[in-house]
């Protein structure tokens, strides 16, 4: 692995992955970050890297649905490895308007696989980043394993399931060297404030209502983003080709408990809101998401046993770091919220 094409590197997990590779890992090669810069892609998240790693980091604004454009990037930079994060990622948006999810998540992944196949003598690995949501919803007990049948319930998870199947087929049919990871819910720095944790942190900071869907008892298995990325890197380096690996934090929590934790920590760190005993008073129950999956929980024994991976953060330590990061990065938040960065993109990338 000398030249890794990271797709979606300006998004939440991809940006953290690129930072991890350049700043912390044993990787010594080059990274080409290819991102379309949708509303979720923020080049400010990596703005310092081009100057700090001029020989090793390149950003290219491109759409994975534009096969010729991606081909040019792959050839110009002699890409030998692909780590594919780019996706439309928000379930609520997929319910309202699935079009972009079908295009990017299915057609975009197909394009990348096809391009990798056409360059198979050079491509050492295609790693596909996916979600546990492809497995559907669990009842009160049980865990998703790598052998759990796919049962996606939302347009988002159905589009990711479709892309997973294409990855599997390209390995099985064409011998493309692939690995695939299905991870549980991530949280941490640089997450766009439409997802539960950053939305609740920012609303709670500002004394705005905290919209909890349904009865707030849906369960997610939370993993700190750096722990996801150390697992992805372990799989890329040592994972068996053609295999899939589940990644999770063994941190199952009801949404309401997550929101309570955020409220209590903010009261402690930032001080109470004027006129409120506790930020928990901001919680507002709202109409449930249609088809809302009840519970996700990952059995990550395989990645632990085969690759020796384990998460470094518990939910308690990870959520503290995350809250502190949002408190310390008001500029990033303002730019993301105000749309300033969309103007910045236009100025810099056309
Ligand atoms: P995100 O929405 O924060 O970022 C997605 C990035 O992809 C953005 O930078 C966006 O500009 C880019 N992108 C979108 N469409 C593109 C296109 N057509 N061409 C090029 N770039 C495009 O998403 P995220 O939360 O960082 O998720 C990254 C990956 O991890 C996704 O594949 C997602 O399914 C998967 N995943 C996410 C989670 C989670 O909790 N966030 C959990 C498991 C798996
Ligand atoms: P989300 O962060 O959208 O991730 P996903 O749907 O991919 O799991 O949502 C996490 C959980 O939080 C999910 O059960 C929906 C719930 N939720 C709320 O209750 N209120 C909100 O405002 C949001 C965005 C999510």
Image (cartoon, grey):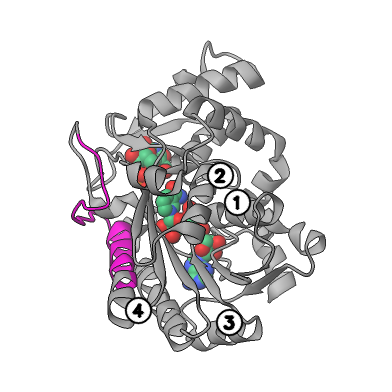
Query: Which is in the foreground here, disc 4 or disc 3?
Result: 4
Determine whether label 1 and label 3 are within 8 Å by CB. Answer: no
Point 69% across, 63% down: residue: 28
Q: Is mark 4 within 8 Å of ligand 1?
A: no
Q: What percent of the width, then of the height, locates residue 20?
A: 63, 51
First along the sequence among labels 1 and 2: 1
Q: What percent of the width, then of the height, locates residue 202?
A: 57, 35
Determine whether label 1 and label 2 are within 8 Å by CB. Answer: yes
**What is the spatial separation of the Cα atoms under label 1 and label 4, in whole angstroms?**
30 Å
Q: What percent of the width, then of the height, locates residue 342?
A: 64, 63
Q: Residues within 10 Å of mark 4 (few under 14, many from 20)?
A: some
Q: Is mark 2 within 8 Å of ligand 1?
A: no
Toward which corner of the image does residue 70 lie, by quadrant?
Answer: bottom right
First along the sequence among labels 1 and 4: 1
- The residue to which callout 4 is attached is 175
First along the sequence among labels 4 and 2: 4
Q: Write the start and end of the magenta stretch as one range.
A: 142-167
- The residue to which callout 1 is attached is 16
182 left or right of 332 in image: left
- The residue to which callout 2 is attached is 226
**Quadrant of the rendering where the N terminus is positioned:** bottom right
Residue closer to the observer: 51 or 256: 51
Per the image, label 2 sits on a secondary structure element best described as helix
**Quadrant of the rendering where the C terminus is positioned:** bottom right
Q: What percent of the width, then of the height, locates residue 107?
A: 37, 77
**What is the spatial separation of the Cα atoms under label 4 and label 2, in whole angstroms?**
30 Å
Indicate whether residue 350 is drawn in magenta.
no
- The residue to which callout 3 is attached is 74
């Amino acid at each position: 692995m000398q030249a890794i094409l990271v797709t979606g590197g300006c998004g939440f997990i991809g940006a953290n992955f690129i930072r991890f590779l350049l700043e912390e890992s044993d990787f010594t090669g080059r990274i080409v970050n290819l991102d379309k810069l949708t509303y979720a892609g923020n080049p400010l998240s990596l703005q310092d890297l081009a100057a700090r790693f001029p020989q090793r980091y390149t950003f290219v604004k491109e759409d994975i649905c534009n096969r010729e454009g991606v081909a040019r990037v792959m050839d110009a930079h002699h890409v030998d490895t692909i780590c594919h994060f780019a996706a439309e990622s928000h379930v609520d948006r997929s319910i309202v308007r699935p079009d972009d999810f079908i295009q990017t998540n299915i057609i975009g992944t197909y394009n990348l696989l096809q391009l990798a196949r056409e360059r198979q003598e050079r491509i050492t690995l295609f790693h596909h980043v996916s979600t546990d949501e492809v497995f559907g919803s669990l009842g009160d007990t049980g865990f998703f394993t790598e052998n759990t049948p796919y049962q996606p319930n939302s347009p988002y998870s159905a589009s990711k399931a479709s892309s997973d199947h294409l990855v599997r087929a390209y390995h099985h049919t064409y011998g493309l060297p692939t690995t695939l990871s299905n991870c549980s819910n991530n949280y941490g720095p640089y997450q766009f404030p439409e997802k539960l944790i950053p939305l609740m942190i920012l609303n709670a900071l500002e004394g705005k209502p905290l919209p909890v869907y349904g009865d707030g008892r849906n369960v997610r298995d939370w993993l700190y983003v750096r722990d996801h990325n150390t697992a992805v890197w372990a799989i890329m380096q040592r994972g068996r080709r053609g295999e899939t690996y589940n990644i999770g934090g063994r941190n199952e929590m009801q949404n309401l408990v997550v929101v309570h934790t955020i409220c209590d920590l903010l009261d402690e760190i930032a001080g109470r809101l004027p006129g409120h005993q506790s930020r928990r008073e901001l919680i507002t129950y709202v109409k449930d998401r249609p088809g809302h999956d009840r519970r996700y929980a990952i059995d990550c024994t395989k990645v632990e046993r085969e690759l020796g991976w384990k998460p470094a953060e518990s939910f308690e330590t990870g959520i503290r770091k995350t809250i502190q990061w949002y408190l310390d990065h008001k500029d990033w938040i303002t730019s993301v919220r105000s749309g300033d960065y969309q103007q910045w993109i236009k100025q810099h990338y056309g």
